[in-house]
Amino acid sequence: MERVPVLKIGDILLVSIQIDMEDQVALQLQEDLADRIVATGCHGVIIDISALDIVDSFVGRTLATIASISRVLDAETVVVGMRPAVAITLVELGLSLPGIRTALNVELGMDLLARNRAEEYDDRDDEDEDEAETPAVNAS
């Protein structure tokens, strides 16, 4: 069985799907990606589907499941390179792909993940400042 390679680029895992996404390949990718997120501690996943001419309902649901698993493991998923025909098919199938952000290409996907990560750090800094400014209440 063929496997989809998962490459690490900085804090991001890049998956470039260049083969037909048969059901077994999609399930194996789901497992491989979860293992790599845990092993690397990466916080972003980019799935490049620009080579796919068609995405069926099973592969669409698998992409949504991958995004959910990634989110639970503290990684955000961005799908890039979606062809118009694939987008139309997903909408017609009623697959909204919850939890998946999209971008036109890998570069824009990486920018999106970087911006989201920076905003997350800013939010954490704001929370730390709020906690430091809250005076302790003495309950005597």
Image: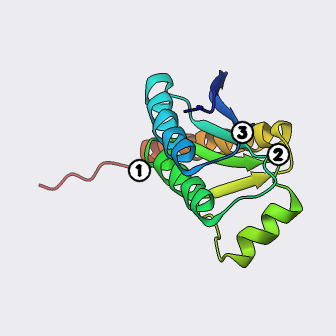
Residue 101 percent across, percent down from the top left: 69, 55
Question: Mark 1 Cα within 10 Å, few/some/many (few <14, many 20+)?
Answer: few
The crowding category of the residue bearing disc 3, from other C-alpha atoms within 10 Å (few below 14, some 14 to 19, many at least 20), is few
Distance between mark 1 and mark 2 Cα atoms: 50 Å
Quarter placement of the C terminus: bottom left
- The residue drawn where x is 76% and y is 46% is 49
Residue 56 % position (x, y):
66, 63
* Sequence-first disc among 1 and 2: 2
Q: CA distance from mark 3 to mark 1?
A: 55 Å
Disc marking residue 19: 3
Q: Which comes before the other along the chain, label 3 or label 2?
A: 3
User: What residue would you read off at disc 1?
Assistant: 134
Residue 37 seen anywhere in this rendered image of the structure: yes
The residue most toward the front is: 1
Using residue 19 as the reference point, say whether residue 6 is left or right of it: left
Q: Residue at x 57, y 61 (%)?
A: 58
Residue 89's quadrant in the figure? bottom right
Is residue 136 or residue 90 the one in the foreground? 90
Could you say whether the residue bearing mark 1 is in a helix, strand or loop? loop
Q: Secondary structure at mark 2?
A: loop
Tag 3: amino acid: Ile
The amino acid marked with disc number 1 is Thr
What residue sits right under mark 2 in the picture? 50
**C-alpha distance separating marks 3 and 2:** 11 Å
- The numbered mark, 3 or 1, whose residue comes first in the sequence reads 3
